[in-house]
Image: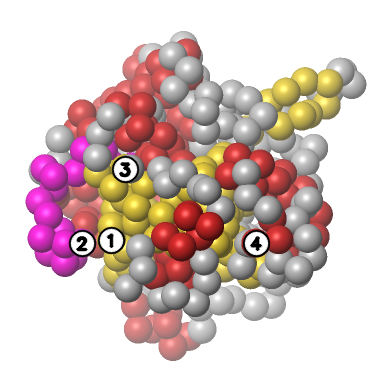
Amino acid sequence: MSEAYIVATARTAGGKRNGRLAGWHPVDLGAHILNAIVERSGIDPAAIDDVIMGCVTQAGEQSNQIGRNAVLASNLPQSVPAVTIDRQCGSSQQSIHFAAQAIMAGVQDIVIAAGVESMTRTPMGINIIPGGGFTPWPESIQKKFGVQMFSQFMGAEMIAKKYGFTREACDAFGLASQHKAAAATQAGAFDKEIVPVPITLPDGKSAIHDKDEGIRYDVSMEGMAGVKLMMEGGVMTAASASQVTDGSAAVMLASAAAVKAHNLTPLARIHNMTVTAGDPVVMLEEPLFATDKAMKKTGMSINDIDLFEVNEAFASVPMAWLEHTKADPARLNVNGGAIALGHPLGGSGAKLMTTLVNALHARGLRYGLQTMCEGGGIANLTIVEKL
């Protein structure tokens, strides 16, 4: 079986809802990251076998096969095919898996795994809002699981209750994420991974967007304590949950033959890919069990992994993951996570991989693990080895 190598990574800085990226059509934002990843790799774009683009809310401007539209809007030749996939929050992490699988199977040699989401212009849930005369959950599912709908907010609270997490503990986790992201930004830790995006400010002036917009540099526990609870009787607030964000990201993968033929520089090797599924009601707990399966399959222990990226959909998720795995918290989300940096849904998988690979290189470490909770009670997990 062939190896699959990551040869280039790129992401935009996150944009707040109605913020600095709000003027970008999501297709153009996806095209911008495709152009950037090709430029960074130095490869002839005609050599790309496929583009696999994750996008969750495939409606409005993100409908009608946004992956293909992003290729058509980019500098890539129209001969490059593309597909759009939805594995909820793990969509572009699954893009990485599909790309690696195609390469490892010997079917393709160079694939771009990407993701994009404009949560400003295509708000989360507009394709499933009740009242439109339809529901994605028929009576058969509602009866089977005893719910009328599946809610990530309920799932986050159920996890917090199961593990005994208090409001204060979740706030403290959110505060740490903000502090780490602020420190990483000020130290230039993201400079190599972020692709500058030209924007027009409200006053008509031109500017460059190259810093994650959601970081709160002056946040305090006192300030977080004043944020309203998401649910009465719960512990989670907007300050301990991922931010609504616009953004895109991409990872280019290549076979050993392509690395040699195109004089590419491998940054990391795909070591393991795991996907598991479990309780769709609790929904967000599955990264814990995906980690168990990956450790068993690889023969590794959690202490063999140098850095972890566990998506901060809600603070209770990575907190439960730490409790379950007994991993070293100092290795987790070392540059902050989605609570501070944002969670552009379909773009987050490739975004986290970009950050993970760059962090491994910056710190001279070897193994990194990325995992993501996803709608429907699914989790993707990827282990990479830095080269």
Of residues 212 and 198, the one drawn nearer to the viewer in this rendering: 198
- Residue denoted by label 2: 294
Q: Where does residue 171 sit, x and y in percent of width and height?
A: 32, 28
User: Looking at the image, is mark 4 or mark 3 earlier in the sequence?
Assistant: 4
Q: Disc 3 vs disc 2: Cβ atoms closer than 8 Å?
A: no
Q: Label 4: state its secondary structure.
A: helix
Location of residue 104 with respect to 42 vertically, above or below: below
Q: What's the amino acid at mark 2?
A: Ala
Alpha carbons under labels 3 and 2: distance apart: 18 Å
Alpha carbons under labels 3 and 1: distance apart: 13 Å
- Residue denoted by label 1: 272
User: Looking at the image, is mark 4 or mark 2 earlier in the sequence?
Assistant: 4
Point 44% across, 51% down: residue: 6
Dot 3 crowding, Cα within 10 Å, few <14, some 14–19, many 20+:
many
Q: Is residue 14 visible?
A: yes
User: Looking at the image, is mark 2 or mark 1 earlier in the sequence?
Assistant: 1
Residue 112 as seen in the image, left or right of residue 22: left
Alpha carbons under labels 2 and 1: distance apart: 7 Å
Asked if residue 206 lies in the magenta stretch, the reply is no
Q: Quarter-wise, where is residue 120 in the image?
A: top right
Q: What's the amino acid at mark 4?
A: Ala
- Per the rendering, the mark at residue 386 is 3
Q: Where does residue 32 sit, x and y in percent of width and height?
A: 72, 44
- Judge depth for marks 4 and 3 and give the one in front: 4
- Residue denoted by label 4: 47
Location of residue 354 with respect to 289 vertically, above or below: above
Q: Label 1: state its secondary structure.
A: strand
Location of residue 200 with respect to 360 vertically, above or below: above
Q: Quarter-wise, where is residue 181 in the image?
A: top left
Locate the N terminus and report the quarter of the image it occupies. Answer: bottom left
